[in-house]
Amino acid sequence: MTDLLTRRTPTPVPARPRRTGVGVLIGAILGILAIASLFIGVSDVSPLALLTGGPDSSAAFLLVTSRIPRTVAVLLAGASLGIAGLIMQMLVRNRFVEPGTTGVTEFATLGMLISTVFWPGMAVVGKMAVAAVFGLLGTWVFLRVVRAVPVRQLVLVPLVGIMLGGIVGSVTVFFAYRLDLLQSLGQWSQGSFASVMQGRYEFVWIAGAMVVVAWFAADRFSVIGMGEDFATNLGLDYRRVVAVGMVIVALITASVLVTSGVIPFLGLVVPNVVSLIIGDNARRSIPWIAGLGAVFVIACDIIARLVRFPYEIPLSVIVGIIGAALFLWLLLRRRGRAH
Amino acid sequence: MLTDTVTGRTPAPARLGALWARPGLRLALLAVVALTLVAVYFFTDVPGSLAFAVKIRSLTVLAMLLVATAVGVSTVVFHTITQNRILTPSIMGFDAFYVLVSTVIVFFLGSASFLGADPLTLWLVQVVVMVAFSVFLFTWLFGGKRRSIHLMLLVGIVLGTFFRSFTEWMQRMLDPLDFQVLSDAMFASLTRPDETLLLLTGAVVLLACAAVPPLLRILDVLTLGEPAAVGLGVNHRRTLLMLFTIVSVMIAASTALVGPILFFGLIVANLAYSYAGTFRHVWTLPTAVLIGVICLLGGQIVLEQVFNLGGSLSMVIEFAGGLFFLYLVLRKGAR
Amino acid sequence: MIVLDGVSKRYNGHTVLDEVSIAFGAEGVTALIGPNGAGKSTLFGVVGRLIRPEAGRVAVDGSDVATARSSDLAKTLAVLRQDNHIAARLTVHDLVEFGRFPHSKGRLTVTDRDHVDRAIEYLALDDFRNRFLDELSGGQRQRAFIAMVLAQDTKYILLDEPLNNLDLRHMTEIMKLLRRMADELGKRVIVVLHDINFAATYSDRIVAMRDGRVVADAGAAEIMRPEVLEAVYDTKVDVRQIDGRPVALYYS
């Protein structure tokens, strides 16, 4: 018998180091940043002011109506966008896709525009629903178009998605231009949490709920990520899981869109970095992606608030710079691989 | 074939086909179409004095001619250097880069110098900085290992986002006054071009164009790829540097005139290749320029007269260009 | 038993499976041979409910593949197709664990973990347990996929060209392993092979296909004859007896 069948002398198995330490570190950073986020702003909300002022002070009022909602919205958006990216990557089996590189965001924005034009008085929840439906349509269109591209054409897939987004985007800009809505469009296409307040951010909880749903279905998404053949062999209803994934992606995209506007590259960078560290088993990676996504966005939000104090710079600008640089690194570091 | 032509015994369609096969004639036909469009543009719907209308409109036509030249030449040359027909300077984010350079200059020198200094000098400073940086960027991306075109495309698109975000950040950090100056200077409109800017870019484009004719044959050789070109005695590095400088100057000119138009070069160059039917740059370059003029002018006329949508030409170009691009990429990807 | 009854499949007017009726599962290792385009992979696709046939039905242990619950089928039948490419960065352990998905839906019990450990040990993958798939050699990766299928703990295991891209040593190892899985664990292995000598050496039964039909179905001794093989492959084949075993020579 060959050495395969007789057991080899057992060499000590180098287990992958447990990453609990890093996990705790990320949690700690997240906590510190979240607390810092509560106390950064033009008006004075400091722990001292809160203590001396009591529950009825203006500081406490600001904390409850503005700072806490903002911090929560930032954390939820950061966590959920990474998950939306991860799920898209599993559905398409390509690590360079996310709502923003597949036209989903642009479709959702078009939905926002349409709801604003046709039903100007519509409540935010209605707009979000329309945006979500359009986002779903966008995912569907993208999945259809991408079927024409061989799976292993790693970078062609996001390229096609970006172009698709560009086309939909130019339609949106055209109508916004004709209808004098360029300004509203600018608001959605530029992510910022500056206007987040109590009563105007609650939809982002839907995105948060989707993270939980995704975590419960994590194994299913991992199996989907292995491809249709594997999924069917393991007895999974491929189409149904894909449909659930599409809905999650659309809901996250739409709810973040109505809360803050577009935040670029996040869904792409965070899952890829996590994948490098611990791999793609979704059950393990989802908490990491949610945590790191939240850290990344809250750090960027704090930078956006501080860099030109007392003015604010749109968060999407900061994320765009850092995210694009990280994405470039991800793209070019694999230069050795064949394409 | 030859004897046939001499004896004149070929049936008429075949003779037409033979004529059609001559690139010179095709080019002439294109020129006629372009001139007709110019005439149509000048003389339709004149509201008041004809002389005034012609004067105003000739500026627009001149701007379009400059943009078409800059975009057409730079894209075709870029295609030849990079050995593909999908990547264009704009898709690689180079015009976004130009905007960034302008912003950075205003950011560090302030609008005072932007306004005060001689505009020509300032322009040259911008172009020099732009060329220096883009040559660096170019050698970083295209020097060394050959990477897949699709990867470079994606890199270019991300670079574009990076430059735009960075520009935006810089602009947010500017004084509102400086910002106003900057946006006025940078985004002149095609239909209402600024005269000084027009003259300036005109001179620069003309200068860059003058450098092209001696390089035409070398460009033809470069289509064979670097190893073959080097084997045929082309000083590859130096030529590339020169060509790339020309490309950068052209991009600077067109971006200064109309701002970034992502897909225009792609459409124009690819239409030019299939229309000219030859790889020789003597034909492809002017063909690209003329097709550019026809697209811009024809598009403007159609939008103005038929759809009454004067100001939205660039959006229409983006839309059509995006579809065309998808078609190109998917067709290539399917192979 | 896996029973196919009059199964036909057409692609763009081209018949890939032409009323195939056959039963598998009485023997330990069945080899499926035939030239390219004979319909072997399509046959596997149909049995594994990945491809829907135009006519005919497939039953696995009496239940119709088209109507049975996919998750139940996954407990009796495992299919590994050729050229598996998983883009996701999964470790060997992750992959093998997913073999337990039909049983546990992702929440692994003690039994599940036991199956995973045994499958990994059976394929001598202990040393690579925590390696990512993209860090493995072709032979190791193929073993990891087979370990996953083994962990699925099904009666029937269908492998489509598992020897693709493997060197001589790894080919032999995989074939011996399939033999062992049949003999020791009572699995019913059906495997598509291109090397007819491997088929003859390691299988109990050889099914030869050509142009979407089963053209020969017997033990190695009967299949390994020049006239049979030449009819299947349309090329000249010589068969010699070496150490009492038939060996096909087709290089001349």
Image (cartoon, rainbow, N blue to C red):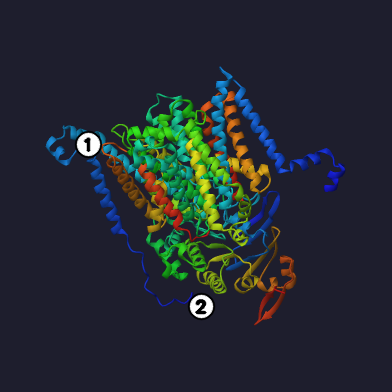
In the rendered image, residue C42, in percent from the top left (x then y), is placed at: 63, 56
For label 1, the residue is A63
Left or right: B295 as drawn, with respect to A201 = right
Amino acid carrying mark 1 in the image? Leu
Tell me if residue C105 can be seen. no
Image quadrant in which you'd find residue B29:
top right
Q: Secondary structure at mark 1?
A: helix
Q: Is residue C64 left or right of residue A126?
A: right
Which residue of the protein is positioned furthest toward the top in this rendering?
B48
Q: Quarter of the image containing the C terminus of chain C?
A: bottom right
Q: CA distance from mark 1 to mark 2?
A: 70 Å
Asked if residue A206 is positioned above or below residue B54 in the image, the reply reads below
Q: Position of residue B269 (x, y in %)?
A: 60, 43
Label ID, residue A2: 2
Total residue callouts: 2
Read off the chain for label 1. A
